[in-house]
Amino acid sequence: MSNPDDPKPGGGRDWSVVVEDGVTKTNEPVSGAFAEPEAATRRHEPHEPSREHLPERLYEPRKAVHNKRIDGPFRRFKWLVMLVTLGIYYVTPWLRWDRGPYAPDQAVLVDLANRRFYMFSIEIWPHEFYFVAGLLIMAGIGLFLVTSAVGRAWCGYACPQTVWTDLFQHVDRFVDGDRNARVRLDAAPWTWGKVMRRAFKWSIYLVIGFWTGGAWIMYFADAPTLVHDFWRGEAAPVAYITVAILTLTTVTLGGFMREQVCIYMCPWPRIQTAMLDEKSLIVTYKDWRGEPRGSVKKAQKNPGQFGDCIDCVQCVQVCPTGIDIREGPQIGCITCALCIDACDKVMKDIGRPRGLIDYATLEDCEREAAGGEPKSPLRTLMRPRTIAYFMIWAGIGGALLFALGNRSHTELTVAPDRNPPFMLLSDGSVRNSYTLKLRNMESRPRDMEIAVEGLPGGVMWTDTIGRGEASPVQRVTVPADLVRQVRAYVAVPEGAASQQFTFRVTSLDAQRETDTVQTRFDAPEAE
């Protein structure tokens, strides 16, 4: 951009260009500003209203967020959620659950080798993936329910990014001190003391990241065995690769990127606007009560001229994403409510009522600004939209529980041979061949009875039971928690026609579970 003192073509100083605080700016309209990228404009288009602030840059370097320690009910709730969620994540693989001698005793296990998912007394087989799909649908609807009721409460308390970021921020406080000490340390030159402090802190980051990746792989194999093999260098290469990747991502996202993941990378802040309405509880600054801002001394000297906000910026200093909630709802607000704790503490200290920053709906804000009373939180939550979300969520959960409680642990599949469809035996009888798969979903071996029904004169034998012992009913043993494949041969007397019949399998135990499959018996056409 040209220097303001450079002469214009007609002579004289270029008064459309000014220098403020060492930054060159132009008074030309936005469309007519011919400036370098770092230049800013103070003017607006003729059809636009006047701008009170200079346009912000679309991209700018990250400003480190050093949030301040705070205590209060919402902070203590965050502590509780963090301890519970991290405890579940790190401890669950070590829990044991007795399923008998034929099944693993790890309480929660994703057994990829055998294609099983175990969760305490529940065992999910590959063909039952609809249970997993149902849980994912419930998770999505649950997220819609929480967001429509209390905003981004999931993001503020239970999201993995939030939980691990909170953990890393506590590490920062432990090593570097609270906010002011961390700000001073960041601005200080690199001395040996700063290098050692950073090395110590980042070593803790690596330990946390390593144990995060290590805990993840334990969900896919027996935890004690895997740990033993891992440290002896005998684990599968994929285990080491997975731990390395998760260590890197945990340290990068939770230790360094932090709020940038919530603001720039996560799609949910953009989606949540469709979930919120004027009846949703969100963290809100009550500007009609707080504005205009002024210190306590100013308010005492000029009664009635200032609001309750004393511009202490405590709400900004405790925010984990570094936003100013007083500027209204923003994409960076994760609804953690730490600003409420900070503001309530200040209000108590200066003798003013709490709730300058509080959970509130837009309807309640308008009502309260007009002098009315806000609704109770229970009445706010009990509205048609949240009730509908809850009923759908509960309905899916109830259907999954019903299906889980009534599913059979004995199943049969039948695949007839198509080439050739039948064979003529020496005695004139006709034989068809079938591949049967008997599924035993119990963690113990079971005897099962296979019967041929609806096929007059039909008898059956297998690869292990000779034709001399052929009969309409055969008995086989199916190993625990496995699918046994049986090669079955069915024969009928000479002259039989093609027809439908049924294979029936029955477990020979106290449960007496059965499953039937209808199939076709092929025979030569009569001349």
Image (cartoon, helix red, strand yellow):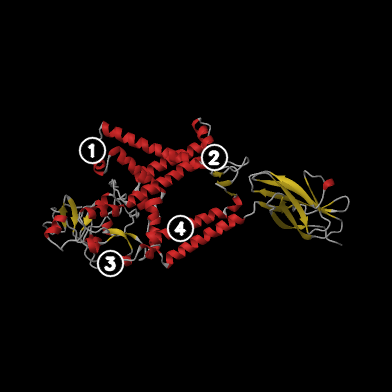
Compare marks 4 and 3 and give the one earlier in the sequence: 4
Q: Which mark is residue 221?
A: 2
Q: Is residue 375 above or below residue 57?
A: below
User: Do labels 4 and 2 touch, CB within 8 Å?
Assistant: no
| Distance in Å between CA atoms under marks 4 and 3 | 30 Å
User: Do labels 2 and 3 touch, CB within 8 Å?
Assistant: no
Type of amino acid under label 1: Ala
Quadrant of the drawing holding the C terminus: bottom right
Residue in the foreground of this view, choosing between 431 and 95: 95
User: Do labels 4 and 1 touch, CB within 8 Å?
Assistant: no
Q: Would residue 454 be visible to someone looking at this image?
A: yes
**Image position, residue 284 (x, y; %):** 30, 60
Of badges 2 and 1, the one in the foreground is 2
**Mark 2: few/some/many CA within 10 Å (<14, 14-19, 20+):** many
Q: Dot 3: what SS?
A: helix
Q: Residue at x 47, y 55 (%)?
A: 139
Q: Which mark is residue 142?
A: 4
Q: Residue at x 40, y 51 (%)?
A: 158
Tag 1 residue: 188
| Distance in Å between CA atoms under marks 3 and 1 | 47 Å
Q: Which mark is residue 368?
A: 3
Residue in the foreground of this view, choosing between 525 and 202: 202
Compare marks 2 and 1 and give the one earlier in the sequence: 1
